[in-house]
Image (tube, coloured by chain):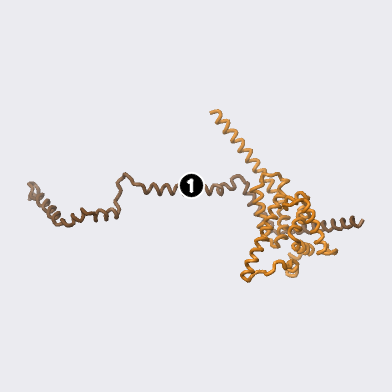
Chain colours: A orange, B brown
Amino acid sequence: MNACVVSFAVSCRDKHHTGVSTLQREQELNRFFAEVEGRALRIAEIGVRDRDEALDLVQDAMIKLARKYADRTGAEWTPLFYRILQNGVRDWHRRAAVRNRVMVWFGRGNKDDEDYDVVAAAPDPIGRTPDEELQSDQAMDSLDAALAALPGRQREAFMLRTFEGLNVAGTAVAMGCGEGSVKTHYSRAVHSLRETLGEHWQ
Amino acid sequence: MTERKDNATENAFVERAKQHFDKSVANLDGETRSRLNRGRQAALAEIAPGGRTWIEWAPAAGVAAAAVVAVVMWTGNQPSDELTPTSASTDIEILFTEDSFEMLEDLEFYSWIELDDETDETLQPGGHVG
């Protein structure tokens, strides 16, 4: 009888502790998402060139992180989150490529995706509303287009290192590759971007 | 000397890129912010206490409900000791047994017996006295 009472008391105490820690974890995760979500959206948007798709990818990444890695330390969340997000972006491109092949087969697709002109496809500043025009940033538009034209791994390395501020080790975790590869991709990305944007880009 | 200058130029370029990017994040419109917030809440619901309870239990509840229905249907078809109204199929079985045909052949005889019994009842003393 006494053993049952002790067991029940321990069980209640454990449940209480679990509840408190879950609440704390939820608050920590909320802060983390709130801090990172804007940058994550822009990074995904540059990757897929579509805001709605980027929003879906960011939400999926947040859900997967919460579901699988909520018990990890806060320091681990950033590279894990971006790893999930980058995987989502890569999957999106694979699906888009397959979809395009199918559409080409039916005679309705873009026949050569390799010839996609990202600069020509960039939003036209002339067609914007005054509000949008106020918010617009020609330099950022150029940077968006130049980033979109980079090979995927170079783009990932540059955005994670520069925009998210991850160090080489964190970027390697997020990209799922070695630190040497990160350095190579990053260096090539910077070189290509400077060449594309020119010396007068401000 | 040249390498140092190139590094400084590269750092300045990276810094400018970061500034433009941060500005574009700061300029995200209200609707986008709202959608991000909804996505965040959906993600947090994954770890909220009881947040996924009904979803986690849904498959088990479905199996249990199916099992209950199966048991009820199976026991419902079992023969019972209680007297129950006979179905139409039972009537047809009785009607077309060999004995029934014999009864139909002697139908006139059975009618006569029935009539005879009724006549005897009326002739008994005290049956109908005026």
Q: Secondary structure at mark 1?
A: helix
Residue name at image x 29 percent, y 50 percent:
B85
Q: Report the front residue among A105 and A30.
A: A105
From the top left corner, tell me how far across and down residue A42 is, in percent.
72, 58
To which chain does the residue with label 1 belong?
Answer: B
The residue that mark 1 highlights is B64
Residue name at image x 62 percent, y 38 percent:
A16
Q: Report the front residue among B83 and B5.
A: B5
Residue A128 visible to the viewer: no
**Residue projecting furthest to the top:** A2
- Residue A23 in which image quadrant: top right
Q: Report the front residue among A93 and A31.
A: A93
Q: Is residue B65 above or below residue A7?
A: below
From the top left corner, tell me how far across and down residue A116 is, in percent.
72, 67
Lateral position of residue B8 relative to residue B69, left or right: right
Residue name at image x 66 percent, y 60 percent:
A94
Residue type at numbered disc 1: Ala
Dot 1 crowding, Cα within 10 Å, few <14, some 14–19, many 20+: few
